[in-house]
Amino acid sequence: MSTTDTLPVTLDRVIEAVEAVGLIPFVSNTGQVAAILPNRTVRIAVPEGHPVQGVADYPRFFDPSHADAIASAVRRLNASTYLPKITSGTTEIGTIALHLQHTFNWVVGATDAQVHAEVSQFIMAAVAMMNQLDIMFPDQWTKEGSNA
């Protein structure tokens, strides 16, 4: 029987994995690294003594009249996607917000290949899920006008 020693997943290793995806990591003093893309921000929190969490907030809010359609979309996306999982919640002003989340399973550590692959998968899957939401719920205000 063979064993493999794996190093703990640290903020520095997550930063390296974000760079390996080809993105510039933005690092906070609270143990988070963010990949900031046009109209998308995906964060990975590396809290001391707790599992690493991938999080992203969909950059739009919905009127409560769309609650049934949002709930249906959330169920479909969660049923068809391994990660991230999406939840909806009501903001202080009554609009519906969408939150994407994934807990990485690195309790005893991970190889560099595992960290790189899972960080890449989370970032790409979160952006893909937000793109699906854009298609399901087109924002009429973001359509570009002609440059004529």
Image (tube, rainbow, N blue to C red):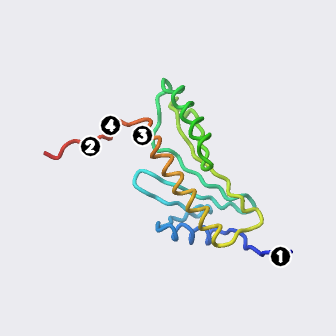
Task: Reply above or below: 93 against 1.
Answer: above
Looking at the rendered structure, the secondary structure element under dot 4 is: helix
Spatial CA distance of label 3 from label 4 is 14 Å
Q: Nearer the viewer, mark 4 or mark 1?
A: 1
Q: Residues within 10 Å of mark 2 (few under 14, many from 20)?
A: few
Mark number, residue 144:
2
**x 67%, y 69%: residue:** 10
Q: Residue at x 62, y 40 (%)?
A: 79
Q: Nearer the viewer, residue 27 or 144?
A: 144
Image x and y of residue 16, in percent: 56, 72
Mark number, residue 2: 1
Q: Which quarter of the rendering shows the N terminus?
A: bottom right
Q: CA distance from mark 2 to mark 1?
A: 58 Å
* Mark closest to the chain's N terminus, 2 or 3: 3
The amino acid pointed to by label 2 is Glu
Tag 1 or tag 4, which sits nearer the N-term? Answer: 1
Cα separation, mark 4 vs mark 2, equals 8 Å
Give the Cα distance between marks 2 and 3: 16 Å
